[in-house]
Image: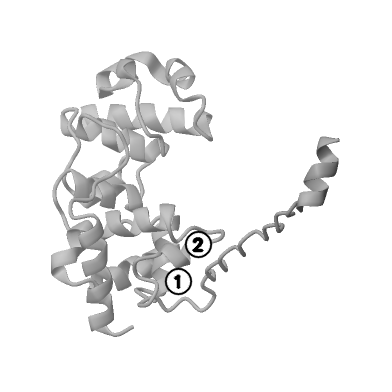
Amino acid sequence: MHAATRRAIYRRLRAANPAPTTELLHSSPFELLVAVMLSAHTTDRSVNTPAAIVALGVEGVKPYIRPVGLYNTKSKNLVGLAQALIERHGGEVPADRAALEALPGVGRKTANIILNMVFGAAEIAVDTHIFRVANRTGLAPGRTPREVEKALTANTPPEFRKDAHHWLILHGRYVCKARAPACPACIIRDLCEYRHKTPARPPRAAARKRPLRTVGPRARGRARI
């Protein structure tokens, strides 16, 4: 894809959403870290600090995150994460990538989101939505999330890099969906290199109206008899 096309794509995404942000509900860096790690949209008020989670322990945490997939493993990671934050970082979320990725349950994607959202770094976290959009559109083709991340980081103009993660994830979540992407309604469809775009539905044919039967004078007369 030509650099000018990439720039045009980001311009349109920015025009449609000038101040994008995460859809994860949080009121502190720690709550965001937990929400990203659990892939959950909120955290319970009773378990919103590292100390509270450590005090609950693994079995105490499980009821709070039971609706989350793999909650047994994630309960252990969550308690381990809280303990590590207290022991290594005074209960605060670190601003260093290596320190973040050393925490239980925190991988590169989660670290990138925290660095971007909490510390303002121009990092691009690649999840399944961004991986799909980057490959479909031609913005940054790659066989793995790491390849796509490298390509996006290299190819995204600096003025768009900070918000690129949010634009692409929202585009993948609501427009460029895995099944039946909404190509006819897509604001970048003419710039996208995807070969199998969803075609626009043909307009519905107007329902045929049955002609009104005219009733002649004789018929009306008979009807009154």
Name the residue: 25% across, 67% down. Answer: 12
Q: Is mark 1 on a helix, strand or loop?
A: helix
At a point 23% along the width and 71% down the height, the residue shown is: 156
Report if the CB atoms under discs 1 and 2 are less than 8 Å apart: yes
Residue ID at (56%, 66%)? 203
Q: Disc 2 on helix, strand or loop?
A: loop
Position of residue 165 in the picture relative to residue 145 (left or right):
left
**Amino acid at pointer 2:** Pro
Q: Which mark is residue 181?
A: 2
Residue 158 in view: yes
- In the rendered view, does 93 fall on the left or right side of 57? left
Label 1 vs 2, first from the N-terminus: 1
Q: Can the viewer see residue 155?
A: no
Q: Which mark is residue 136?
A: 1
- Circle number at residue 51: none
Way the structure is coloured: one colour
Depth-wise, is mark 1 or mark 2 nearer the camera?
Answer: 2
Q: Mark 1: which amino acid?
A: Arg
Relative to 42, is 183 above or below? below
Residue 101 location, x and y as percent?
Answer: 30, 47
